[in-house]
Image: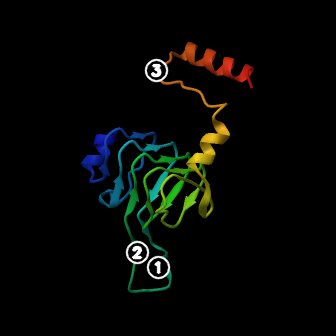
Amino acid sequence: MNDYFRKAGMKIGKGCNICCNIMNTEPYLISIGEHVTISGGVSLITHDNSISKVMKDKTDFVGPITIGNNCFVGANTTILLGVELADNVIVAAGSVVTKSFLEKDIIIGGNPAKKIGTWDKFREKYADTAVFLNGLSPEDRKKEILAHQMHK
């Protein structure tokens, strides 16, 4: 799917995991860094027609969206035009990102999104509950998850 987005004009770095259709009417305004995960239901909105209601001689606001390297965008997040995310930003599920976040190693969330944490505090909080599931068969994955739940 990444090649489809690239052919349409999006700049997408290597190692990205895009889990939904992020295509929009201005794909050439979207730039995604390397090793980015975009979860299901994410919308990248590079234009807004609302100005046409207050300025009869204008039809749209238009602006780019830039996502840095090693970011995670949670499910059902909306990122609006003009937003830039620094490297190492986690966006909580369901967030509406209306402004740029240029600080690295942070977690943002909410509507509108605001800084809600840092990577260091996140790592501390979940160190004992996080699991490694890459490459496991469905049955081994289930066993690992259930075993981990038993040790809580």
Where is residue 70? Give x, y as percent.
43, 45
Residue type, mark 3 in image: Gly
Q: Secondary structure at mark 3?
A: loop
Sequence-first tag of 1 and 3? 1
* Residue displayed at 36% across by 50% down: 33
Circle 1 residues within 10 Å: few <14, some 14–19, many ≥20: few
Q: Which mark is residue 60?
A: 2
Residue 135: which disc?
3
Q: Nearer the viewer, residue 40 or 108?
A: 108
Closer to the eye: label 2 or 3: 3
Q: Residue at x 61, y 18 (%)?
A: 144
**Mark 2 vs mark 3, CA separation in Å:** 45 Å
Q: In what element is the residue under mark 2?
A: loop
Image quadrant in which the N terminus is located:
top left
Q: Which mark is residue 51?
A: 1
Q: Quadrant of residue 149?
A: top right
Front of the two marks 1 and 3: 3
- Colouring convention used in this rendered image of the protein: rainbow
Going by the numbered disc 2, the residue's amino acid type is Asp
Instruction: Report how far apart the C-alphas of labels 1 and 2 lie in the structure.
Output: 6 Å
The answer to which of marks 1 and 2 sits earlier in the sequence is 1
User: Mark 2 or 3 closer to N-term?
Assistant: 2
Residue 54: x and y in percent read 50, 85
Q: Which secondary structure, mark 1? A: helix
- C-beta proximity under 8 Å, tags 1 and 2: yes
- Looking at the picture, does residue 61 appear above or below residue 39? below
Residue at left offset 49%, top offset 75%: 50
Report whether 81 appears left or right of 149.
left
122 to 64, vertically: above or below = above
